[in-house]
């Protein structure tokens, strides 16, 4: 089974009390320090462990929509930053 197939299965069994998503590209699966699992990888190739005593913990991150951007002048330069990071910025000259 591939990571993409797991995402599709998850989408078909989505909890009713959580906003759903229609695109598997918005779902990220993160497993035990292995980083974001790639859609084309099989679970075996991604080295997702199988435990006899409990389910394998996998974090699910959903990016419902792209972060809006804004332009902000910094020392005479214009930098594009996400709204989330608007409090911090660097300019390299």
Image: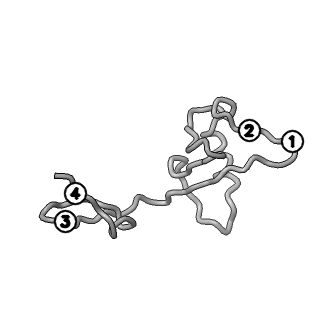
Q: Nearer the viewer, mark 1 or mark 3?
A: 3
Compared with 17, 20 (above or below) is: above
**Residue on which disc 1 sits:** 52
User: Which residue is under mark 4?
Assistant: 91
Pick out the residue farthest to the top. 45
Q: Is residue 53 left or right of residue 64?
A: right
**Location of mark 2 (residue):** 49
Residue in the picture at 31% in, 62% down: 69
Tag of residue 74: 3
Element type where label 2 sits in the image: loop
Q: How is the image coloured?
A: one colour
| Marks 3 and 4 close (CB-CB < 8 Å) | yes
Determine the secondary structure under disc 1.
loop
How far apart are the two marked residues, 1 and 3, measured between alpha carbons? 55 Å
Asked where in the image residue 68 lies, by quadrant, the reply is: bottom left
Cα distance between the residues tagged 1 and 4: 51 Å
Is residue 30 in view from this perspective?
Answer: yes
Q: Is 38 on the left or on the right of 87, as rendered?
A: right
Q: Callout 3 environment at 10 Å: few (<14), some (14 to 19), or many (20+)?
A: few
Q: Earlier in the sequence, mark 1 or mark 3?
A: 1
Q: Residue at x 79, y 48 (%)?
A: 55
3D distance between C-alphas at marks 2 and 1:
10 Å
Q: Closer to the camera: disc 2 or disc 4?
A: 4
User: In the rendered view of the protein, which quadrant contains the N terminus?
Assistant: top right
- Image position of 44 with respect to 67: above or below: above
Image x and y of residue 30, in percent: 61, 47
At x 29%, y 62%, the residue is 89
Sequence-wise, the earlier of marks 1 and 4 is: 1
């Amino acid at each position: 089974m591939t990571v993409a197939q797991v995402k599709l299965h998850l989408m078909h069994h989505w909890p009713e009390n959580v906003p759903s998503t229609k695109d598997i590209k918005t779902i990220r699966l993160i497993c035990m320090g292995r980083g974001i699992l790639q859609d084309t990888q099989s679970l075996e190739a991604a080295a997702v462990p199988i435990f006899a005593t409990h389910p394998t913990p996998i974090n699910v991150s959903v990016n419902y929509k792209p972060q809006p951007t804004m332009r902000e002048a910094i020392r005479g330069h214009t930098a594009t930053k996400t709204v989330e990071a608007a409090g911090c910025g660097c300019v390299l000259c």
